[in-house]
Amino acid sequence: MRLLHTMIRTGNLDRAIDFYTRILGMKLLRRKDYPDGKFTLAFVGYGDETDHTVIELTYNWDVNQYDLGTGFGHLAIEVDDAHAACEHIRQMGGHVIREAGPMKHGNTIIAFVADPDGYKIELIQKAA
């Protein structure tokens, strides 16, 4: 068994795809409209779905915003340098919500950014 994907809903699919591809450097792997169901699915990730876990972006037509709720925490991405990643994300127009630094009660360097829909993404610096 393996984890295939995480699904999150977006109120603006093009804006979400732009964030995950242009700002976080993922690739748009596939996108398909489902007219009978009035929704579109787009899959983004750092590698092919056969070998990598990816994110499924779900856009329900005519729904522009969602309440994030209290059950969802965050997605996590490993980076070489959390400080440099924050700076790059900021320069590309992304929103850094916690600057890079040691995690509370630990030494791992982390940061948090938010995607255009408000979902939190933790950047975890590779251990030296």
Image (cartoon, rainbow, N blue to C red):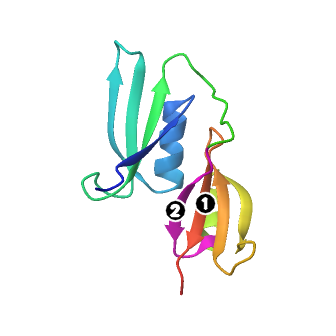
Residue drawn 60% across the image and 52% down it: 74
Number of residue marks: 2
Q: Is residue 15 above or below residue 93?
A: above
Q: Give the residue furthest to the left.
A: 50
**In the image, residue 103 lies at what x, y percent?**
71, 72
Residue at point 35%, 15% (across, down): 35
Tell me the residue that label 2 is attached to: 77
Q: Is residue 100 magenta?
A: no
Q: Is residue 69 above or below residue 28?
A: above
**Which three-letter amino acid code belongs to the residue tagged 1?**
Glu
Contact? badges 2 and 1 (CB < 8 Å): yes
- Outermost residue, front direction? 1
Q: Which residues are magenta?
A: 72-82
The disc at residue 122 is 1
Depth check: 36 or 91 in front?
36
For image coordinates 65% across by 75% down, the residue present is 109
